[in-house]
Image: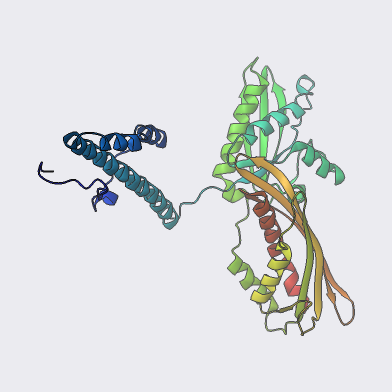
Amino acid sequence: MKPNETVNETSTPTPSKNAGQARPSLATASELKVKMKKFQRLPTLVAMATKLTPQTKIKGLKCAAVIVTFLLAVGATGRVMAGDAAVDSESSKATGAAQPDVLSVAVFDFESEDDEVRDLGPKVGALVNADLSAEPQIITVERAELEKVLGEQELGLSGTVSLDSAAKVGYLTGAKVLVTGRIFKVDEQTIMVAKIIGTETSRVYGEVVNGKPGEAITDLSAELAKKIAADVVQKGDTLVAKVESREDRIAKIKAALGDKQLPVVSVNVSEQHFGQYVIDPAAQTELSLMLQQCGFTVVDGLSTNKPAIEITGEALSEFGMRKGNLVSCRARIEIKAREVASGKILLLDRQTSVAVDLAEHIAAKTALQNGADELAERVLPKLVQ
């Protein structure tokens, strides 16, 4: 600025057009906050500048202009950094990179038949369960809940789980992976053997740790838990059945329906989520949507067209557990289909499912939606038989 030029005190310096394109190297967000705090006195500096002599005022305003320009550049850089993060996210999606799924794991008491380790089986199961619960990609089934569910079905929490019973245990508990094992002594060594079973695929993996004489059980359990966690995370695609897309599921249902005439259907499934008020019936909505997308005519009580088949039932969901920012919910749906003209019960079915989300209500709704999708795949073809 030349000395003879007048200064407009109300003018605001215009940032450069390239400010948003600049990519200055900034450190962490915490360092950025520290830098920003240094310039929180900007209003005070401007106020002081207005009270100075004309020559000093010009210098003060120049300083203020520099500070404002810097802050605008910082803001633009923040936007660029956020944009870069979004681009990186989209790039990951485009290249097929996906975040690993969070899997539910149920840990059983380890067998301990040898006299020297007879009382260690339940303790090892509890320690392995505790260590696995600290893994970010694993949600463990509460052992008290596991024992209650299995007790009702006359299945023990301890002992080996056969491949035949693994699917049933997974169905009852919502666990995708089961962990069972054994602890025993060989000479002076304590040996732990773990079996990792996929409840949906029946795939089995094994892990072993050998303890030195006098080595603490807690250290052995922690080592074994790390190996189990690595298997669950790295081999999860073989332990859990491939998730069928909605389009594939609808195509399969349509193929099963063939060219048969489809009846008019009504759906009424009452719903309850323990702890929170239910805003919308997720199971009823999902079943109705699946029926429509498969070619059925869906009606309700306000429709002039009357249904040939009524699908009624009940659905419930409840909080499972919280791990970090994630919440798991379990849901169960029970339905029956009745032929209106004759009153004949065409079918009865039920489904239990689990879902994980950041919000409890959404996790509950997603669990109900997943259960309804699985029910639809079994039930809809039977409506035309």
Outermost residue toward the top? 214
Answer with left or right where residue 10 lies relative to residue 214.
Answer: left
Asked if residue 176 shows in the view, the reply is no
Q: State the image coordinates of residue 172 (x, y, percent, origin top left).
A: 77, 49
Residue 244, quarter of the rendered image: bottom right
Q: Relative to 86, is 291 above or below?
A: below
Task: Please identify the quadrant where the C terminus is shown.
Answer: bottom right
Q: Is residue 197 left or right of residue 340?
A: left
Percent across and percent down for residue 19 are 26, 49
21 and 212: which one is in front?
21
Q: Is residue 111 above or below residue 239?
A: above
Viewer-proximal residue among 39 and 143: 39
Q: Residue at x 67, y 31 (%)?
A: 130
Residue 344 lies, with reference to residue 162, above or below; the image says below
* Viewer-side residue, 283 vs 60: 60
Vertical position of residue 322 compared to residue 363: above or below: above
Does residue 265 show up? yes
The structure residue drawn at horizontal position 10% and vertical position 43%, both measured from the top left corner, is 2
Residue sitting nearer the eye, 361 or 241: 361
Quarter of the figure with residue 188: top right
Instruction: Find residue 180 and report its horizontal and vertical position in percent.
Output: 71, 37
Residue at the (13%, 43%) spot, across then down: 1
**What residue occupies the far right of the structure in this picture?**
343
Residue 273, given in percent of the width and then of the height, sits at 76, 53
Q: Quadrant of residue 307?
A: bottom right
